[in-house]
Amino acid sequence: MMDEKDIEFEGKGLHLDGKPKGLIFAVSAPSGTGKTTLCNMLLQEFKDIKPSVSFTTRTKRPGEENGISYHFINDSEFDRMIKEDEFIEWANVFGKRYGTAYKSVFNPDRLSDILLEIDVQGVDKLIKTYNTNNKIAANRPVTIFIMPPSYEDLCERLKKRGGMDPAELDKRLNAAYEEIKKSVFYDYIVTNDDLNEAYLKLKSIVIAERCKNLQKV
Ligand code: ADP
Ligand code: 5GP
């Protein structure tokens, strides 16, 4: 029988379903699949999901804002953050470094869930960290892989998005094969064929995870 003292979280932090807020959703996809499009739809609809703003050494693209799209930092600042153990995970992606700060995922007030858009190496490191630390293991991120419907579609989408020379395009298409092999380690796979259908699946995962029963015996 559940007793009031067993409830460890504040009422204001409840989803009022099974789980307290503070869930971490980590989403990966081969570049060009539609991850950013789908994640933006999610953030638009769910105001209680906050994006984690990563740190990167890559340069800003048109329309991106420092502190919103990324924290754009130089190599020596990135080195400093690694040295001072400020990253829960970081990876080299297409020749630039990207990292998630501990402070972005540890969310002590638990008033929102957190969305990470990180690559497959990052998810791998993140899960290893959660699996080897008992204190945080209960809040292991929910991992979601967005799958392109086909190689041809992926190629088309990358071209449509533009801003990439043919060598860069090739690099991303080759990387996609390796990334898709890693999809077997994810909790969920959402194929982004029809955008609205893929979004429905993505938001259903969020809703279902929020209802997961932590009291189940
Ligand atoms: P990613 O973040 O995975 O690199 P983007 O969200 O930037 O990908 O999407 C890449 C391109 O594909 C964009 O031009 C976007 O509008 C388009 N796109 C996204 N989802 C779909 C879809 N389901 N069908 C067709 N085009 C899509
Ligand atoms: P882009 O340069 O197109 O914004 O991102 C390139 C890749 O880096 C994407 O796959 C994106 O998900 C990944 N990425 C962004 N932030 C992080 C991060 O903090 N850690 C890791 N490991 N990958 C990230």
Image (cartoon, rainbow, N blue to C red):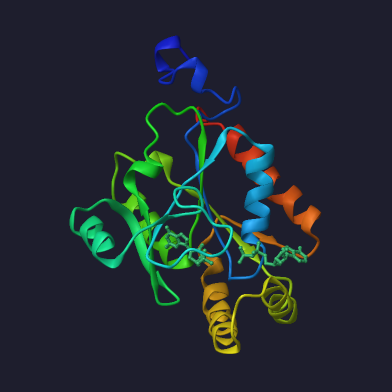
| Residue 10 horizontal side relative to residue 62, left or right | left
| Residue 153 horizontal side relative to residue 117, left or right | right
- Residue 16: x, y in percent? 60, 22
Question: Observer-nearest residue: 149 or 97?
Answer: 97
Q: How many marks?
A: 0
Q: Is residue 166 visible?
A: yes
- Residue 206: x, y in percent? 63, 42
Direction front: furthest residue: 62
Question: Observer-nearest residue: 40 or 177?
Answer: 40
Direction left: furthest residue: 83
Above/below status of 136 relative to 8: below
Question: Observer-nearest residue: 192 or 32?
Answer: 32
Question: Observer-nearest residue: 81 or 11?
Answer: 81
Which residue is depicted at the point 50% across and 27% down?
Answer: 215
- Residue 110: x, y in percent? 45, 29
Identify the image quadrant of residue 57. Answer: bottom left
- Residue 193: x, y in percent? 77, 65
Above/below status of 56 relative to 133: below
Q: Is residue 1 visible?
A: no
Which residue is depicted at the point 22% across and 53% down?
Answer: 85
| Residue 166 horizontal side relative to residue 76, left or right | right
Indicate which quadrant contains ligand 1.
bottom right
Which residue is depicted at the point 80% across and 54% down?
Answer: 197
Which residue is depicted at the point 74% across and 78% down?
Answer: 156
